[in-house]
Image: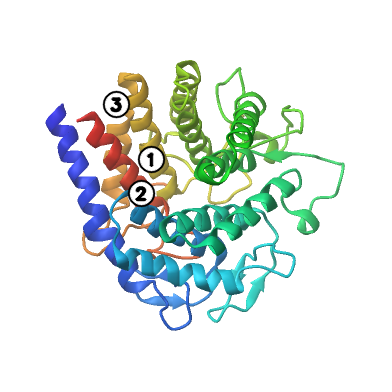
Amino acid sequence: MNQELKNLAELYKNTLLENIIPFWSQYSVDWQQGGYFTCLDREGNIYDTDKFIWLQNRQIWTYSMFYNRLEQREDWLKIAENGAEFLAKYGRDEEGNWYFALDRAGNPLVQPYNIFSDCFAAMAFSQYALASGDEGAKEIALQAYNNVLRRQENPKGKYNKAYPGTRSLKSLAVPMILANLSLEMNWLLSSNQLEEILSQTIQEVMTDFLDAETGLMYEHVTPNGKHLDCFDGRLINPGHGIEAMWFVMDIAKRTNNLDLINQAVDVVLNILNFGWDREYQGIYYFMDVQGHPPQQLEWNQKLWWVHLETLVALLMGFDLTGRPECLEWFQKVHDYTWGHFSDSDHSEWFGYLDRKGEVLLNLKGGKWKGFFHVPRALYLCWQQLKTLS
């Protein structure tokens, strides 16, 4: 067993360091105008030059994180700096809210309609400030974080399309990202503020969004945690639910809360049993809890990030609890993930498969796929496997 885990640790490590990071370092950095190109085809050619704030900030975070936790390589810090300087200059409107998209030169294209741009800005500039010692980056991180706290009850603000008062629903995405973000920001927050926010988000996720009867994590519930019988109210997003659970485990291990850790592992296993495609393998993108047709036409696609976040959650669950079913599921998801998303002929991984596991798009980066889920998951799995072996 130990040798198998050692071999897996080497696989994850070598793929990260020799395949994934070099691809983005070579093809994505816009040294002329700042920031990054994320729309990259199978061979690294740029097919669109727009710059999406989520992905720009995620790339700053990832390079800064590797600089801080892996190796203090100047080229990684320089790449992070290239993005941080670009976004510090062009990323926000006059009120300090982060846009969704810019053109190549930094002119705004899409309004700041959601707080997730601010979430990833806070993550990015916190990690970059830690790497660079830049006081300005620290201020930007805190300003973005305070934006998130201020807007968490109404994430879309004036850009919310829903008619007020008719069907009020809150989304799992807000507390789950706030939990992870707060852990990321812990070196900038007072211990009291950190503990209060972590406690509040854990309570909300594990009480309001977790359904006690099915053991599944719902994507939307009413403000008081009830279910509504409609498309959004019945929606299960397996990837989100599983990713949220490794965030919960990460928080719970700080206080050695084994009950909470085991509860999170239970949810991961429940979601996998519900969301696994028994005919073609892999994890569905969206599901209806009652088995009705989901409104998302892409519901039965297989996405890279869903499988990668699942690998992280399963290894973390096994490391913290020793439960054998975590390792059994890990091997199953690992085999599917490496057999379908990894590109044996070119660098980086595919992102989108059809239900049968055939590649739908040969992109390696786009509007939603950037330098984040693949490298983060490979790094976290490598670290877990190294510990276990």
Q: Which residue carries the number 3 mark?
A: 328
Of pointers 1 and 3, the one earlier in the residue sequence: 1
Q: Secondary structure at mark 1?
A: loop
Question: Residue pushed farthest left?
Answer: 3
Residue 231 in view of the camera:
no
Which residue is at the front of the view, 8 or 140?
140
Which of the 4 quarters of the picture holds residue 290? top right
Q: Is residue 199 left or right of residue 372?
A: right
Residue 307 higher or lower than 116, as above or below: above
Q: Secondary structure at mark 2?
A: loop
Q: Is residue 53 left or right of residue 110?
A: left
* Residue at the (45%, 32%) spot, across then down: 250
Q: Is residue 201 left or right of residue 152?
A: left
* Residue at the (44%, 72%) spot, across then down: 82
Q: Secondary structure at mark 3?
A: helix
Question: Residue pushed farthest right?
Answer: 165
* Disc 1 residue type (three-letter): Gly
Which image quadrant: the C terminus?
top left
- Asked if disc 1 and disc 3 are in contact, CB closer than 8 Å, the reply is no
Q: Residue 326: horizontal and vertical position, in percent?
A: 34, 25
Q: Residue 3: horizontal and vertical position, in percent?
A: 12, 32
Residue 282: numbered disc: 1
CA distance for labels 2 and 1: 8 Å
- Asked if disc 2 and disc 1 are in contact, CB closer than 8 Å, the reply is yes
Q: Which residue carries the number 2 mark?
A: 357
CA distance for labels 2 and 3: 21 Å
